[in-house]
Amino acid sequence: MEGFFLGRQPILDRNQNLVAFELLFRQEETDEKATVINDLSASANVIINAYCQLGIQNVLGKQRGFINADPDLVMSDIISLLPAKHVVLEIKETALITAEFMQRCNELKQKGYQFALDNIVAMNNKVGQLLPLVSVVKVDVLAVEKKELAEIVAELNRWPVLLLALKVENREQEKYCMQLGFQMFQGYYFARPEVLAVKRADPGKLSLLKLLTLVMGDSDVEEIEKEFKHQPGLSYNLMRMVNSVASGVPQKINSIKHAIMILGRKQLQRWIQLLLYTANQSDDSMSNALMQTAAARGKLMELVATTERPHDKNHQERAFMVGILSLLDVLLGIEMQQIVDKLGIPDDMSQALLARDGRLGQELKLIEANEKGEVVAIQSILTELGFLSLNELADIEIQAIGWANRIGEAVN
């Protein structure tokens, strides 16, 4: 089977709650471009592997998945493998639209499948032909001038469709799309928001940073517990998270001291890192999407490190931390250098976080390229690493995503 990987990009509503993911399917590119298998084969491979063998719940959690559905896929029996209530089929107006295709789409719609119109940059007859089929229209806001965008929105508002702003890359674009009435948003901005120098670090998160320093520095349990008591909400969050996700713990954990004794410091450190993303969410509604990205990053880093050195627990733990901490500058609105200094992070981890250098840095670069769907960069890094194939990366990514989803459900 050809190599593939599966990327996910968050889709958020107007309150920045996570409502869906676009599933980005990519195939291994061959040297001879002409032999690259078509979209149908790529989608079929991913559907069969990711959905049938690994379970759609692991990929999506409670969210829906938007999937590129070219005419060949729509016309094929493969569609029946996809549960209607979990997916939204994306069709492009550039595709060859035949009477048979329209009839097939209408049949699928009768069966409960939803359609989205992808990558709209202008209104035309073809768009008009497809609009009665779809429930979501994705407008490429990066490719359209402000005035034209307002005109497109006015046209689309005559139809009973939800509008999704695609390729939102900065705060200004997001604000304008909000004003125009877009209901959903997608773009790298939401998975990895820009670092805003003016953002004030929230005191609850700074307290957690202090906690993380205590745990990493092997302070007494009493001292750690005392710091938790300054933030009662955090103690509650920690207990809830640990109880719902800690596997193999025979009894309920009901105190910080108990959590440290049962879990050990390494695991406690892990939960504190994750809690940083969920503390005091009221002032930062993007925390949840960011936490999902960070959790999946940490787990994926750990699984990559496990493939590389199956018996080196220390290496795996450091990889997990690098993944989780790599988004902390965005979350706190402070420079990564300050975080590294404050936490007294070891050199190999600092190099990874500050300059993407060294083995851990290279693995972090791989995960970031994977999030963005950069096929060439992914393949180049995999070749340099030399111990992981594209298919293995896809397999462990599904595991990491499943883990991140369970964490997300535990803290919501």
Image: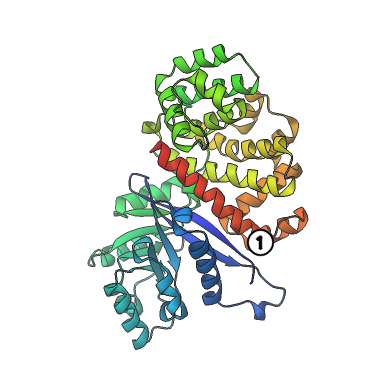
Q: Is residue 227 left or right of residue 352?
A: left
Quadrant for the N terminus, please. Answer: bottom right
Q: Is residue 73 above or below residue 290?
A: below
Q: Is residue 205 above or below residue 313?
A: above
| Residue 395 coordinates in the image, percent (x, y) | 60, 57
The image quarter containing residue 329 is: top right
In this view, the residue farthest toward the front is: 250
Quadrant for the C terminus, please. Answer: top left
Name which residue lies at 56% across and 22% down: 261
Q: Is residue 219 visible?
A: yes
Which amino acid type is shown beneath numbered disc 1? Leu
Work out whether residue 303 or residue 370 is closer to the camera in this orientation and state it.
303
Work out whether residue 41 or residue 147 is closer to the camera in this orientation and state it.
41
Name which residue lies at 34% across and 77% down: 124
Q: Is residue 340 above or below residue 1?
A: above
Q: Is residue 396 left or right of residue 9?
A: right
In this view, the residue farthest toward the bottom is: 99
**Residue linked to disc 1:** 390
Characterize the local packing of mark 1: few (<14), some (14-19) or many (20 or more) Cα atoms within 10 angstroms: some
| Residue 384 coordinates in the image, percent (x, y) | 77, 55
| Residue 118 coordinates in the image, percent (x, y) | 41, 68
Name which residue lies at 62% across and 39% down: 320
Name which residue lies at 50% across and 52% down: 188
The image quarter containing residue 148 is: bottom left
The image quarter containing residue 134 is: bottom left
Q: Is residue 120 visible?
A: no
